[in-house]
Amino acid sequence: MKVLVIGGGGREHALVWALRKCKRVDKVYCCPGNAGIAGLAECINNTDPYNIKALVDLVKCEWIDLTIVGPEVPLGLGIVDLFEREGLKIFGPNQKAAALETSKVFAKDFMRRHGLPTSRYKVFSSYPEAEDYIHLMGAPIVIKADGLAAGKGVIVAPTYEEAEGALRLIMIDRAFGDAGNRVIIEECLTGEEVSFMVVTDGKTIVPIPTSQDHKRVFDNDKGPNTGGMGAYSPAPLVDGALQDTIMETIMRPTISLLAKDGIKYKGVLYAGLMINEGRPYVLEYNCRLGDPEAQAILMRLDSDIVDICLSVHDGTLDAAAIQWKPEAAVAVVIAAGGYPGAFQRGKEITGLEAITPSDEVVVFHSGTAFDNDALVTASGRVLTVAALGEDIAAAKDNAYKAAAKIHFDDMHYRKDIAARALR
Ligand code: AMP
Ligand code: GLY
């Protein structure tokens, strides 16, 4: 069969890599893909991955059997609804279900209405009223743009001045455009964050191994938030009892309460959780696999990914036995200097040939391109070095040994990915 992956980052490279291990997959396409993905799939560069009608045409023209959506934007545009109307198989939630990620106001109101554990908040569409509220509440406080903002629309403000600056950025400077028409101002939670994902066909809900992301750009969680600088799986913080609590108080109710509201959720549901004194609180939902969590987690997948996606589509996930490798995985993101602020593209990448390709260590490309024959950087997050090991310490060691072989000018990566799990 032929499978299309939409997206062009490290998560999509990991999806393509997992698909290439499936016996019944003959050909993989990726739109737009990147230079690393090009070694495993046909990259489609002449179709806009956000033009969902053009993607329908592509799938029909190439007789593609299944489409897997990596990022949130096409889900928010309703790609699943359109594909389903056209009778095409696709993996991901529909537009209404994806609103859990595409509208933070929708997600918070849903949680409040149903009593799901999350921080207290208020929604504003007027700047003076929002400003009065932060004045009243004081800092620390969290300011969030309602809509999608490529991971930059959340500002955790330690002081009143920073909260006001965040509010101005979103509501007056309109840094995120219409995504900032409404803001959420919420109580700042403390504790430790984990990423908890499930895969569901709307009836059966299967937990995916736990993981932890590293949001801040510098070691020891310093500097601004990024899309994610590294991940590891499993997250030792989540023991069996906590996993049960998360499933019973958050994941199952989210999916069944959505169904009660007339919204069937199919695909991967991701909850970003804050664990405070052993209790989980939802910081945010995502309607897809996390990046870089996916790179760590897919290293551990020991089942056929296409079978899982098809069983979600067919509503037969109850019959699927999803196996995971017992090894731990660590994924280290190598970024361009300056990221998540301004950075340069086009720097030549060397050293990848010194890393022997294996199932134990894989360099997923997050943002690369070819400049003639040279492999060059093409975005802020450039590569994700993912490795397995018998435990987190061994996986970490394997990932960093490989990362040390890679070079490009001004490259930067955190040296403490997974250190938290080893304390
Ligand atoms: P994202 O929405 O993925 O860009 O990430 C937002 C990040 O902001 C989370 O991963 C947390 O680190 C932080 N965050 C969001 N909401 C809160 C909150 N209520 N309290 C403390 N930190 C938060
Ligand atoms: N790593 C967090 C995310 O994918 O949103």
Image (spheres, helix red, strand yellow):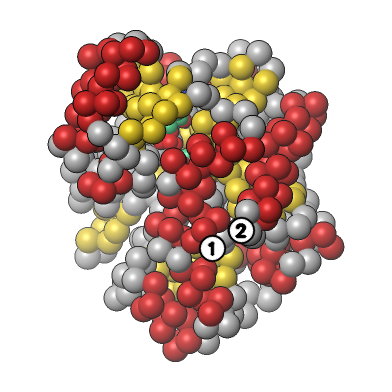
In the depicted structure, whether residue 215 falls above or below residue 346: above
**Residue placed at 66% from the left, 64% from the top?**
309
Q: Which mark is residue 169?
A: none
The residue carrying pointer 2 sits among few (fewer than 14), some (14 to 19) or many (20 or more) residues within 10 Å by Cα, namely: some
Q: Separation of disc 2 and disc 1 at Cα?
A: 9 Å
Q: Which residue is mark 2?
A: 263
The answer to whether residue 24 shows anywhere in this view is yes
In the depicted structure, whether residue 179 falls above or below residue 310: above
Q: Earlier in the sequence, mark 2 or mark 1?
A: 1
In the depicted structure, whether residue 211 falls above or below residue 2: above
Q: Nearer the viewer, residue 386 or 111?
A: 111
Residue type marked 1: Asn
**Residue placed at 72% from the left, 33% from the top?**
249
Where does residue 341 sit, x and y in percent of width and height? 23, 34
The answer to whether residue 389 shows anywhere in this view is no
Residue type marked 2: Ile
Quarter-of-image position of residue 97: bottom right
- Find out whether the residues at labels 2 and 1 contact each other: C-beta distance under 8 Å: yes
Image quadrant containing the C terminus = top right
Where does residue 369 sit, x and y in percent of width and height? 29, 58
Q: Which residue is mark 1?
A: 94
Q: Nearer the viewer, residue 206 or 236?
A: 206
**Residue placed at 70% from the left, 58% from the top?**
202
Give the secondary structure at mark 1. Answer: loop
For ligand 1, which image quadrant applies? Answer: top left
Quarter-of-image position of residue 277: top right
Where does residue 200 sit, x and y in percent of width and height? 69, 55
Tag nearer the camera, 2 or 1: 2
